[in-house]
Image: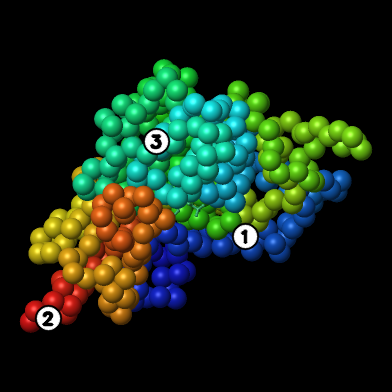
Amino acid sequence: MREQFPFFKAHPELVYLDTAATSQKPQALLDAIQNYYVNDNANVHRGLYKLAYDTTEAYENVRQQVAGFLGAASADEIIFTRGTTDSLNLVASAYGPQVVAAGSQIVVTGAEHHSNFIPWQQLAKRQQATFTVTPVKPDGTVDIAALLAAITPQTKVVAVAQVTNVAGDTLPIAKIAAKAHAVGAVVVVDGAQAVAHLAVDVQAMGADFYAFSGHKIYGPTGIGALYGRADLLQHMPPIQFGGEMISEVRDDVSTWADGPIKYEAGTPHIAGVIGLGAALTWFNQSVNAAAFDNEHQLADQLRAGLAAIPDVTVYGNQASLATVSFNLTGIHPHDLATFLDEQQIAVRAGHHCAQPLMARLGVPATVRASFGVYNNADDVERLIQAVQAARRYFHGID
Ligand code: PMP
């Protein structure tokens, strides 16, 4: 698998354990982007010449491909965005005010990434709604019973990650959706950490909106998608205006195009869309259930190895996917990450854009190791040994 990623030829000694921040890119994706710029470059949805038609067709084919990848009923339910953050802000700003009013309630978990937290917090403030943040367990995973109990007849939106980005736990979206739908609320799912590590089916899980980023699934940065249920998108107004998204524009009134391009004002990130399509094609061909299992096993191996080291706190649980966060008592996570960097091990240290979670765990930050399809047991072993060495070094143990 590693052979397919030129990054590892450029960095043969590096142990890359930061796929949750961004994944490395397979050659197939790099070739597709270069081919687009060299051979197929034209704007979409406007030109009246063959190249422009062909590029438009390729762009729209990726929309179909994303619909298939997510299990959506139709390509009309897929909006191209800049990524998860952009997708979630679009739902909160465009759809949010349609359903959230004074006295309504928005429910999020205490483990959300800022991009599935702040847009809802700000919407609640604008609409004078209640913003409920549900508890997490001491290991940083979401307390599902408390989340379900927080959903009330006033709830209009439940916004949750499918897989959280610090503890890596997987939320039972179907169960959450059943409770939310029973009170007439919609479920907005942040799929940023999920898409690369499990099979997604938005209809089966009952998601009303689902957001993800291309760069977390071996695709380009700057591109992502938002799935929105067709009947909900019908009533969702655009919030950006300009070229391509219109039907007619007069001095006094404008009308909008039908379908998702209504939300894609201006020249889109065409190379990003083409690249996303190539990444998904590569992913479907190369990444199977065995690869998912391997990532899960690496996470288990790391959790077990770290748990055996004195002074280490490990977050997450057996159901956590591909992501393990931890701390070494008495050592700042940034110092530990710097020590690991000197051993050519790339991990993330910080609050992981989850400050509400850090506050609940009572820590300023954690170290996070996260896996992709190119990682193996040796990578995990090197990290475990380096953490042992760090403990000896910082605690002055021989
Ligand atoms: N949600 C989660 C759970 C994430 O891990 C991330 C990326 N760190 C995001 C949202 C935001 O994704 P992006 O920066 O690609 O918009």
Q: Amino acid at mark 1?
A: Ile
- Disc with the residue nearer the chain's start (3 vs 1): 1
User: Residue 356: where, in percent of width, then height?
Assistant: 36, 50
Q: Amino acid at mark 3?
A: Thr
Disc 2/disc 1 C-alpha distance (Å): 50 Å
Read off the residue under disc 2. 396
Q: Residue at x 48, y 46 (%)?
A: 118
Quadrant of the rendered image containing residue 38: bottom right
Q: In which quarter of the view is residue 378 placed?
A: bottom left
Front in this rendered view, residue 163 or 147: 147
Q: Which callout, 2 or 1, points to the residue nearer the camera? A: 2
Residue 328: assigned label: none
What residue would you read off at disc 3? 132
Q: Is residue 289 left or right of residue 115?
A: left
Label 2 vs 3, first from the N-terminus: 3
Q: Point out the frontmost of discs 3 and 1.
A: 3
329 with respect to 171 (left or right): left
Q: Does residue 244 show up?
A: yes
**Residue 102 vs residue 247, the one in the foreground:** 102
Report the residue marked by disc 1.
33
Cα separation between marks 2 and 3: 45 Å
